[in-house]
Image (spheres, helix red, strand yellow):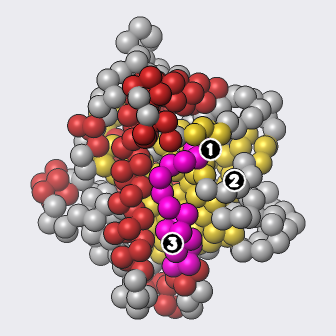
């Protein structure tokens, strides 16, 4: 992995010629192979909208714990890993993470055919608060759906960078598993216990992540010298990183880099990650035909379900959620 995280201007890909798109896809491919992370600028998501999402996040997390626990992820009636995650619920740090979150994904009916007849347990409705005016409209109808469109464009860039047709992933992302999170980290000025960080060292599970950081630093990436480097916030950019499914899909050509969060800013930190996966029943097997496959083929939904089972405490104590 390189020592530096490149900044890639996405405007030419969104608005330019075929040559522009090829050039940007090559830059993205280089970053994915060498670093596993890059910043994406000129991505066409209005900064004013992102700011309103942060405002909604602050409103949600400022509520009492009793109010937030009404939406506890372990109480979600659909068992599809959506709702509120309190402090220490996730165990990317051995003793639990110093963060709280709110998880949502693609809004699908409870009687979705794939969910009911084929066991796609990560599909279904979201678990929304009913006491926050405008929360769902801003978070889902405005921001989430725009991020879906941006993710589709990034899939096109990844395809071109792998010498595939730009629409290669399209049929596998008609009903994608795309999870968005609102995250709140309290300040951790002094790390008293390495086993209890804001977010412990890990790789992401899906194909790639688009992360909006607030102005507070905290994200750190492990480079090839085994040094933690800071991914400082850059205004009006998303941090993009490759996840495990894409590393498997590319037979390790794209790197799913280890990262963590320690909020040493001295103040509250918010972030908004959006994790992009394909359709539940997409078979993940190597796209690289001239190399021996390093991983056994696996269905994307089964892989993500197992990773959630390994991470969330409620899924380890509630047997009904691990079916």
Marks 1 and 2, how far apart at CA:
8 Å
Specify whether residue 96 is in view: no
Magenta stretch holds residue 279: no
> Which residue is labeled 1 in the image?
39
Q: Are marks 3 and 1 in contact (CB under 8 Å)?
A: no
Q: Quadrant of the N terminus?
A: top right
Please, which residue is most extreme toward the top here? 290
> Which residue position holds label 3?
53
Contact (Cβ within 8 Å) of mark 2 with mark 3:
no
What is the spatial separation of the Cα atoms under label 3 and label 1, in whole angstroms? 20 Å
Q: Nearer the viewer, residue 112 or 43?
A: 43
Describe the element under mark 2 as helix, strand or loop. loop
Query: Where residue 33 sits in the image (x, y, percent)?
Result: 58, 25
Residue 55 inside the magenta-drawn segment: yes
The residue positioned 63% from the left and 69% from the top of the image is: 270
**In the shown orientation, is residue 112 left or right of residue 62?**
left
Disc tally is: 3
| Residue indicated by mark 2 | 234
In this view, 207 is above or below 83: above
Of 118 and 204, the residue lying toward us: 204
Graded by Cα atoms within 10 Å as few (under 14), some (14 to 19) or many (20 or more), the crowding at tag 3 reads: many
Q: Residue 161 in the image: x percent, y percent? A: 46, 24
Which span of residues is magenta-colored? 39-56
User: Helix, strand, or loop for circle 3?
Assistant: helix
Residue 229 appears in view: yes
Front position in the image: 6 or 249 = 6
- Specify few, some or many for label 2: CA neighbours under 10 Å numbering under 14, 14-19, or 20 or more: some
Residue 131, position in %: x, y?
40, 91
* Quarter-of-image position of residue 152: top left
Q: Is there CB contact under 8 Å for labels 1 and 2? A: yes
């Amino acid at each position: 992995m390189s020592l530096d995280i490149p900044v890639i201007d996405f405007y030419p890909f969104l608005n330019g010629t075929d040559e522009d798109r090829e050039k940007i896809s090559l830059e993205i491919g280089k970053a994915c192979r060498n670093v596993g992370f890059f910043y994406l600028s000129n991505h066409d998501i209005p900064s004013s909208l992102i700011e309103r999402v942060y405002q909604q996040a602050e409103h949600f997390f400022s509520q009492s714990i009793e109010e937030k626990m009404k939406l506890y992820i372990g109480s979600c009636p659909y068992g599809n890993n959506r709702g509120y995650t309190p402090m220490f619920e996730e165990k990317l740090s051995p003793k639990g993470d110093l963060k709280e979150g709110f998880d949502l994904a693609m809004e699908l009916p409870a009687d979705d055919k794939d969910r009911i007849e084929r066991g796609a347990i990560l599909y279904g409705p979201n678990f929304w608060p009913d006491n926050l005016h405008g929360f769902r409209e801003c978070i889902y109808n405005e921001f989430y759906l725009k991020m879906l469109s941006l993710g589709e464009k990034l899939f096109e860039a990844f395809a071109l960078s792998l010498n595939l047709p730009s629409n290669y992933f399209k049929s596998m992302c008609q009903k994608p598993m795309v999870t968005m999170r609102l995250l709140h980290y309290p300040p951790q000025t002094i790390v008293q216990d390495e086993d209890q960080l804001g977010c412990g060292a890990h790789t992401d599970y899906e194909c790639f992540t688009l992360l909006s950081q607030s102005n507070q630093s905290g994200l750190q990436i492990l480079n090839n010298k085994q040094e933690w480097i800071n991914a400082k916030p850059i205004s009006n950019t998303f941090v993009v990183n490759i996840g495990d499914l894409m590393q498997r899909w590319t037979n390790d050509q794209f790197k799913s880099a280890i990262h963590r969060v320690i909020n040493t800013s001295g103040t509250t930190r918010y972030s908004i990650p959006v994790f992009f996966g394909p359709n539940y029943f997409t078979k993940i097997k190597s796209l690289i035909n001239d190399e021996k496959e390093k991983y056994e083929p696996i269905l994307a939904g089964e892989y993500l379900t197992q990773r959630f089972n390994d991470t969330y405490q409620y899924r380890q104590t509630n047997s009904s959620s691990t079916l």
